[in-house]
Image (tube, rainbow, N blue to C red):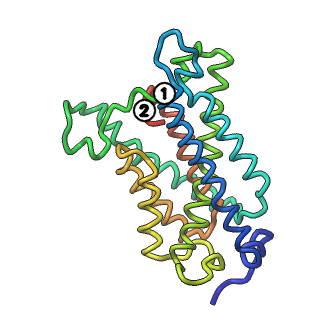
Amino acid sequence: MMATPESPAEPLRWNQPDRWIRRQVIPFAVFMGFLLVLQLAGSFFASDLPSAPWWRKSPEQWIYPIQSVACLVLLGRWWRSYEFHWNLRWSLIGAIFGAVGIGFWLLPTVIWDHWQPQGEGWWTGLGVEDRKGGFDPGDYFAVHSPAWFLSLAFRFLRAVVVVALVEEIFWRSFLMRLVSDWNGPYWKQPFGRHSWLAFGVVTAGFVLAHAPVDYSGAIIYGSLTYLLTVWSKNLGACVIMHAVANGLMGIFILYTGKTGLW
């Protein structure tokens, strides 16, 4: 038997599924669309010339902030359409899951620090690499300058708030329901319903949305998130897990200089 609507967001899901679907999917689509814009900018607009301004040398320095603001506007406008069900107990459990999950994600590069294998081998497929040479505002702005702090602040805002909300709403709230009931009114499915097909499809999609070097960490992290989803039945806990994980990874990057993780 299906549950009955219990929160302000649920009547929209039950009675206006088209609007509910759009509000679940559009923020994620906008987020991914800006990544396409970044790729196009890198192909047709970016420049490595020493005389080029920072906004051409590193288009992500201004595309990421615009991406974050655009997604936050959509999320803020549709906030009451999401079934977060914030709960202190599950938020704390989500934070623990986030710390454990990102620990597995970072483990390969920590192993590299202690092993430092030469060349390529089976370890490369597990992400055992140095992970240097990624997003670093210090490459374009004076360290500790206002521009440097602003760039870093937007990077954390994007990772901790925007990514956590956009991805969990799409992967867990929308796609898990869709995969669990392809032929029926999937929007009426309760949040966190277990289905091995949903586990496989959603986890695979989450993994493929990341770079191959992160696949091993993403498989473990995605599996832990699925476990939290079906155990807690709480979208807010999944968002907290993602936010804590990305926040800890950002701190790790600042401490180690492994900007290739971003």
Tag in front: 1 or 2: 2
| Quadrant of the rendered image containing residue 133 | top left
Q: Position of residue 39 (x, y in %)?
A: 50, 37
Q: Residue furthest top?
A: 51
**Left or right, 210 with reference to 93:** left
N-term-proximal mark, 1 vs 2: 1
257 up-or-down from 97: above or below: above
Q: Position of residue 196 (x, y in %)?
A: 43, 75
| Quadrant of the rendered image containing residue 152 | top right
| Quadrant of the rendered image containing residue 171 | bottom right
What separation in Å lies between label 1 and label 2 (alpha carbons)? 13 Å
Q: Residue furthest front?
A: 44
Q: Nearer the viewer, residue 200 or 254?
A: 200
**Left or right, 134 with reference to 123:** right
Q: Amino acid at mark 1?
A: Tyr
Q: Residues within 10 Å of mark 1 (few under 14, many from 20)?
A: few
Q: Position of residue 146 (x, y in %)?
A: 68, 18
| Residue at 54% from the left image edge and 32% from the top image edge | 41
| Residue at 57% from the left image edge and 53% from the top image edge | 241
Give the structural element (helix, strand or loop) at label 1. helix
The disc placed on residue 260 is 2
Q: Position of residue 231 (x, y in %)?
A: 54, 70
Q: Amino acid at mark 2?
A: Gly
The disc placed on residue 255 is 1
Q: Quadrant of the N terminus?
A: bottom right
The disc placed on residue 64 is none
